[in-house]
Amino acid sequence: MAIVIDAGPSSAGARAADAGKAPFHINKIEIADLIACITKGVQDFTRAPKYGMFFGAVYAVGGWFILWLTFSLGYYYLAYPFIMGFALFAPFGAAGTYEISRRLESGEPLSWSAVFGAVWSRAGKDIGWLALVSMFTQIIWLDIAMFVFLMFYGVHMPSLPQLFANIFTTSYGLTFLIVGNAVGAVIALVVFSFTAVSPPLVVDRDVDFITAMTTSVQAVLANPRTMIAWAAVIGMDLAVSFVTLFAALIVVFPVLGHTTWHLYRRLID
């Protein structure tokens, strides 16, 4: 069974030709398909590790920079929501891994210029628009996180040791942790729905970012069990990366990116 999505109008002549083709078909996939895509993602990483590790390292450095900035400015209480929000940009940071997987799949040669040039020429500004939507979501998430923090602790900010002690040794602090994470999970799920396949879609095909976002949401709604499982895998992998102070991202990040490409290929015809 497949769901048909009209590709919609395009923003340039080249896109008009692609938009005039048959509309997208959203396929039904199962957990077995997800496992197969993860396996292929690992295989793509092992076939071109230096490219994947480069993108993973760049993303890890971004995480380190955010931690340094929040603590150096004294906003340690925003470090956690900042890092959680930073994860929202992973689908766009992984754009290079989609092109790597596409080239490995089609047998095209790999080079740095080919990967970066192809992503820029195919995606154009649409990847940027998708990232901009996530940036606004990040701002909203930070505002909500600040509101939740003030609701529990007021304007008198506890020191970092006091905050940790309160969160992990009192029921009040535990409630704060649960509420904050629950709100963050809802926002993350919304962002996941419109970025699950939209970045690889705009990298691979000449479609506008609105069509890509709509298609992504429809793909998630058509496969809720499998896509929620995929979201859980992403969450667990990122949690491991955070525990290792982002060092694990050097491998985890590209594997997730390659897997996203193969999921996109199974979901969208």
Image (cartoon, rainbow, N blue to C red):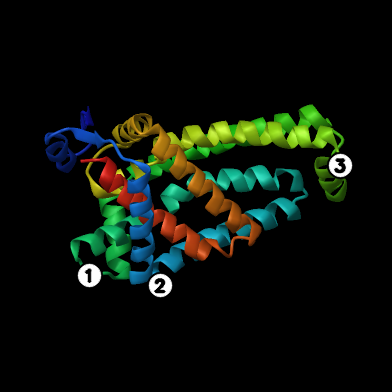
Q: Position of residue 265 (x, y in %)?
A: 26, 47
Q: Residue at x 19, y 61 (%)?
A: 106
Q: Is residue 263 above or below residue 22?
A: below
Left or right of 190, for residue 211: left
Q: Secondary structure at mark 1?
A: loop
Q: Amino acid at mark 1?
A: Pro
Front in this rendered view, residue 150 or 129: 150
Question: Callout 3 environment at 10 Å: few (<14), some (14 to 19), or many (20+)?
Answer: few
Which of the marked residues, 3 or 1, is nearer the chain's N terminus? 1
Residue corresponding to mark 3: 158
Q: Quadrant of residue 150?
A: top right
Q: Secondary structure at mark 3?
A: loop
Q: Is residue 108 above or below residue 239?
A: below
Residue corresponding to mark 2: 50
Q: Residue at x 37, y 50 (%)?
A: 260
Q: Position of residue 75 (x, y in %)?
A: 75, 46
Distance from disc 3 to disc 1, alpha carbons, whole Å, reads: 55 Å
Left or right of 179, for residue 187: left
Q: Which part of the image, by quadrant, shows the N terminus?
A: top left
Q: Is residue 96 visible?
A: no
Q: Residue at x 34, y 65 (%)?
A: 43
Q: Amino acid at mark 3?
A: Pro
Distance from disc 2 to disc 3, alpha carbons, whole Å, reads: 43 Å
Tag shown at residue 147: none
Residue corresponding to mark 1: 109
Q: Is residue 50 visible?
A: yes
